[in-house]
Amino acid sequence: MKTQVVRVSSETHSKLKAMASASGKTIGEMLSKAVESYRRQLLLEDTNEAFAKLKEQGDLWKGELVEREEWEGTLSDGQSDHE
């Protein structure tokens, strides 16, 4: 795997080093996990913001709810997960 140098503050490096030591992982692994966790957090925040904006638009939100109802019906269509 190709790597890159990333500069972090001494404080951040100390925290990463302590976390890595406690978990038995490398600093690189800890940083990768932190970045992935933050990426997911941002995705959820963006999604929540998009749904909040959608809710503000009455007709579009009603359409969303109707579509959800339609999808709910597929849960009881008699098909197994493996078919």
Image (tube, rainbow, N blue to C red):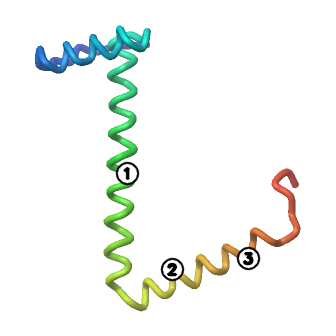
Residue that carries the numbered disc 1 in the rendered image = 43
User: Who comes first in sequence, dot 3 or dot 1?
Assistant: 1
Residue 63 horizontal/vertical position (percent) = 51, 85
- The quarter holding residue 25 reads top left
Q: Secondary structure at mark 1?
A: helix
Helix, strand or loop at label 3? It is helix
The kind of secondary structure element at disc 2 is helix
Whole-Å distance between the Cαs marked 3 and 1?
Answer: 28 Å
Q: Answer with left or right where residue 61 lies relative to residue 28.
A: right
**Residue 64 got which mark?**
2
* Identity, as a three-letter code, of the amino acid under mark 1: Leu
Q: Amino acid at mark 3?
A: Gly
Residue at image coords 13%, 18%: 11
Total marks placed: 3
Question: In the rendered structure, are the residues bearing label 1 and label 2 in contact, judged by CB atoms less than 8 Å apart?
Answer: no
Badge 1 crowding class, 10 Å Cα cut-off, few under 14, some 14 to 19, many 20 or more, is: few
Mark 1 or mark 2: name the one nearer the start of the chain: 1
Q: CA distance from mark 1 to mark 2?
A: 20 Å
Q: What is the number of the mark on residue 73? A: 3
Query: Which class describes the residues within 10 Å of circle 3: few (<14), some (14-19), or many (20+)?
Result: few
The residue under label 2 is which amino acid type?
Glu
Left or right, 80 with reference to 51: right
Point 23% across, 18% down: residue = 15
Quarter containing the N terminus: top left
